[in-house]
Structures are given as C-alpha cells and as structure tokens.
Image (spheres, rainbow, N blue to C red):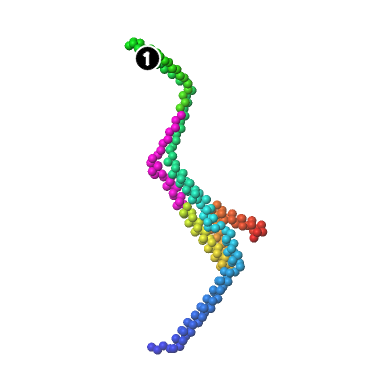
Amino acid sequence: MLTSPNIYVNVSRLLRISVVLFGILFIQTTPTHAQNFNDPRIQKELQALKAEPTIQEVHRAALRFYNAEPKTIEAMRSRANWKYILPDVNVRYRQSDNGVFIDKLDFLQGEPTQNYAIGKDQSEGDVKEFQISGTWSLSRLMFNPEVLDVSSLAGLQEGVLKEVTRIYYTRRRLQIDLIISNPRDPATRLSKELRIEQLTATLDALTQNLFSKSMARQGRVSRGGEW
C-alpha cells in the first residue's frame, strides 16, 4: 500500500501548529500569575494575615483550655509521685475531765506477820492523751495508678496539638486561595468564605475565642486610626 506524502506534510504541520499554540498559551499564562501575585491588593491582604494569631499562640491557648500545658502535667505527675511516698498521718487527741486519784504505798517487810509502811504517794488530776501515727501503702509505692492517669494526659496533649494544627493550616490555605484566585462567581466565593468561618469557629471553640478576640483588637486599632 502506498502512502501519500501529503499525509505526512499535514501531520507535520499540525504538530508545529500545536507546539506554537502551546508556547503562546504558556507565555501568556505565566506572566499573568506572576502579575496577580504581585498585585498590591493581594500583597495587602496576605500581609493582613500576619496579624492573626500564630500557630504557636494557638497551641498555647488550646493546651490552656484543656488544662494540658507541659508545666501543668509535670506538676500533676510530681504530686502523684509524692502522694504515696509520704505516709497517711493520723492524729488523735483525747482528754478526760473526770479526775484520777492514785494512792501508792511502799512497804518494808519485817517479821513474817508484820509489814512496815515507809512511804505513801497520792496524785490526782485529768487525763490528756495525744497520739500521732503514720501508715504507708507499699503496694502503691511500687505501682501508682495515679501516675498512669497523669501520663495519659500526654496523649491528650498530642491529640490537641495535631487537631488544632490541621485546622489552622487548612484554614490558612483557604484564605490564601481566596485572596489569590479572587473568584468572580458569587457561589464559589461564598462557599469558601463559609468554610473559613466554620474553621475559625472551630478554632475559637478550642482556644477560648482566641481568633474572635484577635479580630476585635484589630477592629479597635483600625478605628483608632493606627491603620
């Protein structure tokens, strides 16, 4: 079978046209993105994100909310260790006001049928008794369940840090995407804004309203004329 040379020419021409069109598209697309990123509006809004709480501030606020700060856990562990090293102390005090009378006679033995009294003591008064006792639990010295309970807080601490970190950077990526893409479609913009609000509310719930307080402070500064 013979193949027409025109077919090869047409295919070659189509390939060259495709390469040229791809190059034009690439050249036109790349500067546009660079120009968008350097847009003053984008830079201003990206700079405004730096006024929000940092990830370190979010970590500290979340650990405070869950009472899982490192110094708190260490203090609880120390108290648990010392709890059974020290004894359980019992104190008892007793007083009797009935009066006690004691007669004491000392005898000197003489003849088989005679005893001679050589001294006599008498005492009377009230009774006061004070007792202190201490007990140790040797089994708990060897195995203290409260230390294990405190150690479980380390797992809580790790879980809290991972969760707030995940939410924080998911929110930040959405913020940057919304700023750079600047969608014209109202539905797309509203969807992204609602998602950001949802993540902000979640972080607020985990950090005792850290983001709401930060936005309120920024609003006061802005109205005060410092921005």
Extreme residue toward the right, this view: 225
Q: Decide which of 62, 114 is in the foreground and name it.
A: 114
Q: Amino acid at mark 1?
A: Leu
Q: Quadrant of the C terminus?
A: bottom right
- Tell me if I can see residue 187 in this picture: no
Q: Residues within 10 Å of mark 1 (few under 14, many from 20)?
A: few
Q: Position of residue 49 (x, y in %)?
A: 57, 61
Magenta region's main secondary structure?
A: helix
Q: Which residue is mark 1?
A: 108
Extreme residue toward the left, this view: 112
Q: Decide which of 108, 55 is in the foreground and name it.
A: 108
Q: Position of residue 149 (x, y in %)?
A: 44, 47
- The residue located at (58%, 71%) in the rendering is 35
- The residue located at (45%, 27%) in the rendering is 129
Q: Is residue 195 left or right of residue 78?
A: right
- The residue located at (38%, 15%) in the rendering is 107
Q: Quadrant of the N terminus?
A: bottom left
Q: Decide which of 38, 77 is in the foreground and name it.
A: 77
- Tell me if I can see residue 20 in this picture: yes
Residue 138 is covered by the magenta coloring: yes
- What span is colored magenta in the figure? 130-156
Q: Quadrant of residue 116?
A: top left
Q: Is residue 49 above or below residue 29?
A: above
Q: Decide which of 128, 44 is in the foreground and name it.
A: 128
Residue 34 is covered by the magenta coloring: no
Q: Is residue 169 left or right of residue 116?
A: right
- The residue located at (45%, 52%) in the rendering is 155
**Secondary structure found at label 1:** strand
Q: Position of residue 72 (x, y in %)?
A: 49, 48
Q: Is residue 133 above or below residue 32?
A: above
Q: Position of residue 225 (x, y in %)?
A: 67, 59
